[in-house]
Image: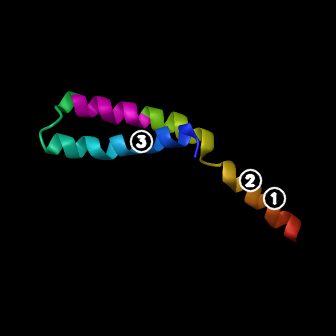
Amino acid sequence: MSIVKIISYLCLLVVLLAPILFFADVLTDSQMRIALLGGTVVWFATASTWINKGDNDSEIETESAI
């Protein structure tokens, strides 16, 4: 697994945990908003590099099998 993929999964974890930590009074409102914004931006930047790489290979194999 590449480092970009690991970073994108960690950002998804941040986006999921930030509201839970806010509800548990661990984070303030502004800290939660910063975590959500940062996690979302970094996730979109990293996931766009690997999310569709496997689809093109399977499409080529299907066409050559026909």
Q: Is residue 42 above or below residue 16?
A: above
Q: Quadrant of residue 58?
A: bottom right
Q: Which residue corresponds to the image point at 46% horizontal and 33% vertical from the top-left? A: 42
Left or right for 60, reference 9: right
- Distance from disc 1 to disc 3, alpha carbons, whole Å, reads 31 Å
Element class at badge 2 = helix
Q: Which residue corresponds to the image point at 41% horizontal and 39% vertical from the top-left? A: 11
Which disc, if any, is residue 40? Answer: none
Which disc, if any, is residue 10? Answer: 3
Q: Residues within 10 Å of mark 2 (few under 14, many from 20)?
A: few
Which disc, if any, is residue 60? Answer: 1
Q: Is residue 64 above or below residue 6?
A: below
Q: Position of residue 40 (x, y in %)?
A: 41, 37
Left or right for 20, reference 41: left
Q: Which numbered disc, 1 or 3, marks the residue closer to the eye?
A: 3
Residue 36 among magenta residues: yes
Kindly identify the amino acid type of the residue bearing the numbered disc 3.
Leu
Q: Which residue corresponds to the image point at 64% horizontal and 49% vertical from the top-left? A: 52
Q: Position of residue 53 (x, y in %)?
A: 67, 48
Kindly identify the amino acid type of the residue bearing the numbered disc 1.
Ile
Q: Residues within 10 Å of mark 3 (few under 14, many from 20)?
A: some
Query: Which sits in the foreground, 6 or 21?
Result: 6
* Residue interval drawn in magenta: 31-40
Residue topped by disc 2 = 56
Element class at badge 3 = helix
